[in-house]
Image (cartoon, rainbow, N blue to C red):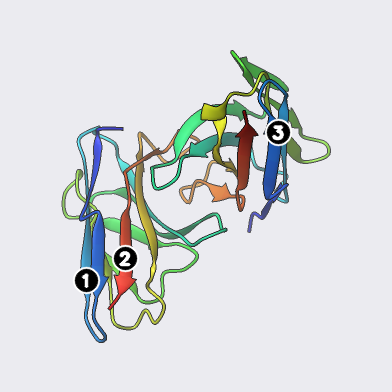
Amino acid sequence: DGGITQSPKYLFRKEGQNVTLSCEQNLNHDAMYWYRQDPGQGLRLIYYSQIVNDFQKGDIAEGYSVSREKKESFPLTVTSAQKNPTAFYLCASSIGSSNQPQHFGDGTRLSIL
Amino acid sequence: GENVEQHPSTLSVQEGDSAVIKCTYSDSASNYFPWYKQELGKRPQLIIDIRSNVGEKKDQRIAVTLNKTAKHFSLHITETQPEDSAVYFCAASRGSARQLTFGSGTQLTVLP
């Protein structure tokens, strides 16, 4: 969907460095999500947000942080505490938080230098 | 919490044949079941979804069936084409704010 933009497409992290992945949507969706995808595995939920200035931990939140200061933006920071950050990160959004289809961005591939 | 198991992990079919992917879920309160298709290096895209008040839903060559008693649902693709080759993910939700729990995915390869 052209309505969700993730950047950058590729990102490299050095040891001890924090990096931030951008996610912007112009779909006027209230809910936004961050997933991590590892090879041969499904999508695992990192954080989600139902409304501006509110967010909740998902299943694998350790080593990650988020903010939701604007409805259209939900950046994800991968901190140095995340010891295995190499993965494909997907951002998604939905109209509401109750059984609505999620629309995904194109993803960011993060690797360690 | 919810647990979704998906089988098989890989599936190869001849062009024109049918493909079936099955998922089971653990939470009997789950009531929404979408299927996503993800081509290599691209975003997952919703291809079909079903809610618990319906037993079957079709969209051209794609259909999904739901058995609430057995807690499983399946994706059926008929007359497969090479462009159907992708990874397919099932998911389940009980309508909570956490939304979806995903299966581990099925790599479908359609052989010409």
Q: Is residue B41 left or right of residue B87?
A: left
Residue B13 is labelled as 3
Q: Residue at x 70, y 20 (%)?
A: B56
Q: Are marks 3 and 1 in contact (CB under 8 Å)?
A: no
Q: Residue at x 31, y 32 (%)?
A: A1
x then y, percent, for residue A19: 21, 71
Label 2 residue SS: strand
Q: Specify the amino acid type for callout 1.
A: Val
Tag 1 subunit: A
Which one is nearer the viewer's eye here, B57 or A66? Answer: B57
Residue A60 is labelled as none
CA gap, disc 1 and disc 2: 9 Å
Residue density around tag 2, few if under 14, some if 14–19, many if 20 or more, within 10 Å: many
The residue at which mark 1 appears reads as A19
Residue B57's place in the image compared with A81, above or below, is: above
Q: Is residue A96 visible?
A: yes
